[in-house]
Image (cartoon, rainbow, N blue to C red):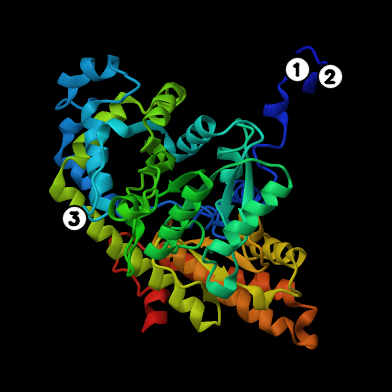
């Protein structure tokens, strides 16, 4: 038996044991609920369906086909073993030259080749998580702050704050203009920081937005660059969803703005891009994160920091081979957009049929779902009450807007790209049943039995859907309820 110390908590660092990681957020609570009771079509058909995970496996078949046709790209195959010794022992902070060249080329392709990127300005990191911490550490001291338009990704509270000691200050955006960030909101947030004697070191934006699924238009980007230039603060642009844009208007990178708007005389040392292959290629497990900075001093600083989160040379080798295949990359980007648009419509059309609206969007792996009319009252307490019903009774892990620092209760982020069609069908039918039961619950006669009826109805829906999914893999696919809902 190990020695128990009554002051055991003091044996660990205050930073490591504090609340800085952000696990107390309902965003992470949803994940924990899923992990305790995960949905499985046959083993646990009444389990929680994961709709809080922004993953993109919709084009994995294209990736798998490329790997089968290019076995030499991996050093762990007979065809690629000749490169094993060189790749296995080589690990430079700069990264393999062919890797940086391929990533720079891919970044240009995802931006329509309207701008180019210098491979020497690329610093690799262990995913976008590591990239964000890296650039925050290099740009700000503990206690200094970054402005962040709301709603924003809950992981930022961990990624940028936990170990660096920097602060994140919200720039409040509202649904009245579809949560568009305005100069007025930026100035208000900046003034609040000054009044609190907090030094603002930068502005962090996500484009395309997580959780909104929208893009920042050219004029807004110009205004943002003008703002940070006037205040002489940094601009960190998270562009990890750049190639998930599936409809017009198209994506505009900050790199295009500073390239085209020469008359702005922007200080390029203030501009930094965070990128990864987790969303655009669907490779979160590969942990390929990128900091691209126009500031040479920041590049050198980040490169020293990158020693704590390098991308494995084996992964670099494989990625370099894949992204250097122009025909494959062009085909992949086009097909990914097609499949994302199809899945978006497949998900949102049935929601609209039962009166659930989503913010109009054209990018990302999720929708910003408006459930304000289902709240008992317009408070965040009512939002959390509704969220608990959705996750523990409807059994869907969706993320409440309050966990994204949304200024208005009743919004939820729902991921639609991380599951197969059958599971999507189950999820949609659970939502439909829930909405209908909600309407019935407004009738005083039916109110008493609402909870039991909801559970019973959901179980019947799941049983029907699971019966379809258990058909022989050689049987003809039954017509999806999603297809029926669209016709």
What's the distance in space between the residues labelled 3 and 2, CA to CA? 59 Å
* Image quarter in which the C terminus is found: bottom left
What's the distance in space between the residues labelled 2 and 1, CA to CA? 7 Å
Q: Position of residue 124 (x, y in %)?
A: 37, 31
Q: Secondary structure at mark 3?
A: helix
Q: Which quadrant of the figure has residue 213?
A: bottom left
Q: Residue at x 15, y 38 (%)?
A: 70
Q: Nearer the viewer, residue 28 or 397?
A: 28
Q: Nearer the viewer, residue 302 or 428?
A: 302
Q: Secondary structure at mark 1?
A: helix
* Numbered tag placed on residue 331 in the rendering: 3
| Left or right: 266 in relation to 179 | left
Q: Position of residue 293 (x, y in %)?
A: 38, 37
Q: Which quadrant of the figure has residue 120?
A: top left
What's the distance in space between the residues labelled 3 and 1, CA to CA? 54 Å
Q: First in sequence: mark 3 or mark 2?
A: 2
Please give the residue where the numbered disc 2 appears in the rendered image: 7
- Whether the residues at callouts 2 and 1 have beta carbons within 8 Å, the answer is yes
Binning the other alpha carbons within 10 Å of mark 1 as few (below 14), some (14 to 19) or many (20 upward) gives: few
Q: First in sequence: mark 3 or mark 1?
A: 1
Q: Residue at x 70, y 67 (%)?
A: 386
* Numbered tag placed on residue 11 in the rendering: 1
* Image quarter in which the N terminus is found: top right
Binning the other alpha carbons within 10 Å of mark 2 as few (below 14), some (14 to 19) or many (20 upward) gives: few
Q: Position of residue 57 (x, y in %)?
A: 36, 52
Q: Residue at x 25, y 37 (%)?
A: 118
Q: Secondary structure at mark 2?
A: loop
Q: Is residue 426 visible?
A: yes
Q: Residue at x 27, y 39 (%)?
A: 103
Q: Position of residue 284 (x, y in %)?
A: 41, 42
Q: Is residue 217 visible?
A: no
């Amino acid at each position: 038996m190990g020695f128990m110390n009554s002051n055991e908590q003091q044996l660990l660092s205050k930073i490591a044991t504090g609340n800085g990681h952000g696990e107390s957020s309902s965003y992470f609570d949803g994940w924990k609920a899923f992990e305790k009771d995960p949905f499985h079509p046959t083993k646990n058909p009444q389990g929680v369906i994961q709709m809080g995970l922004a993953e993109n496996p919709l084009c994995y078949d294209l990736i798998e086909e490329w790997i089968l046709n290019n076995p030499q790209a991996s050093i762990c195959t007979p065809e690629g073993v000749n490169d094993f010794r060189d790749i296995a022992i080589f690990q430079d902070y700069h990264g393999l030259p062919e890797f940086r060249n391929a990533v720079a080329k891919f970044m240009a392709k995802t931006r329509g080749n309207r701008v180019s990127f210098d491979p020497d300005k690329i610093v690799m990191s262990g995913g976008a998580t590591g990239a964000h911490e890296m650039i925050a550490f290099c740009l700000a001291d503990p206690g200094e702050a970054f402005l962040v338009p709301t709603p924003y990704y809950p992981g930022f509270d961990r990624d940028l704050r936990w170990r660096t000691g920097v602060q994140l200050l919200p720039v409040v955006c509202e649904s009245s203009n579809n949560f568009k960030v305005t100069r007025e909101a930026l100035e208000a947030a900046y003034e609040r920081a000054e009044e609190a004697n907090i030094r603002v070191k930068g502005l962090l934006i996500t484009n395309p937005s997580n959780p909104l699924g929208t893009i920042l238009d050219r004029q807004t980007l110009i205004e943002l660059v003008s703002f940070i230039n006037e205040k002489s603060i940094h601009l960190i642009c998270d562009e990890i969803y750049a190639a998930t844009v599936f409809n017009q208007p198209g994506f505009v990178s900050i790199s295009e703005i500073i390239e085209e708007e020469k008359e702005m005389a922007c200080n390029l040392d203030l501009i930094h891009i965070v990128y990864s292959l987790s969303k655009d290629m669907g490779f979160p497990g590969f942990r390929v994160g990128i900091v691209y900075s126009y500031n040479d001093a920041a590049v050198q600083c980040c490169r020293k920091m990158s020693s704590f989160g390098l991308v494995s040379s084996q992964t670099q080798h494989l990625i370099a081979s894949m992204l250097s295949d122009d025909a494959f990359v062009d085909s992949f980007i086009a097909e990914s957009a097609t499949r994302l648009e199809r899945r978006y419509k497949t998900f949102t059309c049935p929601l609209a049929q039962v009166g659930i609206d989503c913010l109009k969007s054209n990018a990302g792996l999720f929708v910003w779902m408006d459930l304000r009319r289902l709240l008992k009252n317009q408070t965040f307490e009512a939002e959390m009450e509704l969220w608990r019903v959705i996750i523990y009774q409807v059994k869907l892990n969706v993320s409440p807007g309050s966990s994204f620092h949304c200024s208005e209760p009743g919004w939820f982020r729902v991921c639609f790209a991380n599951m197969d069609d059958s599971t999507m069908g189950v999820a949609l039918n659970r939502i439909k049943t829930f909405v209908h039961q909600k309407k019935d619950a407004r009738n005083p006669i039916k109110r008493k039995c609402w909870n039991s009826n909801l559970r019973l109805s959901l179980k019947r829906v799941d049983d029907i859907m699971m019966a379809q999914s258990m058909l022989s893999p050689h049987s003809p696919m039954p017509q999806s309820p999603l297809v029926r809902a669209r016709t």
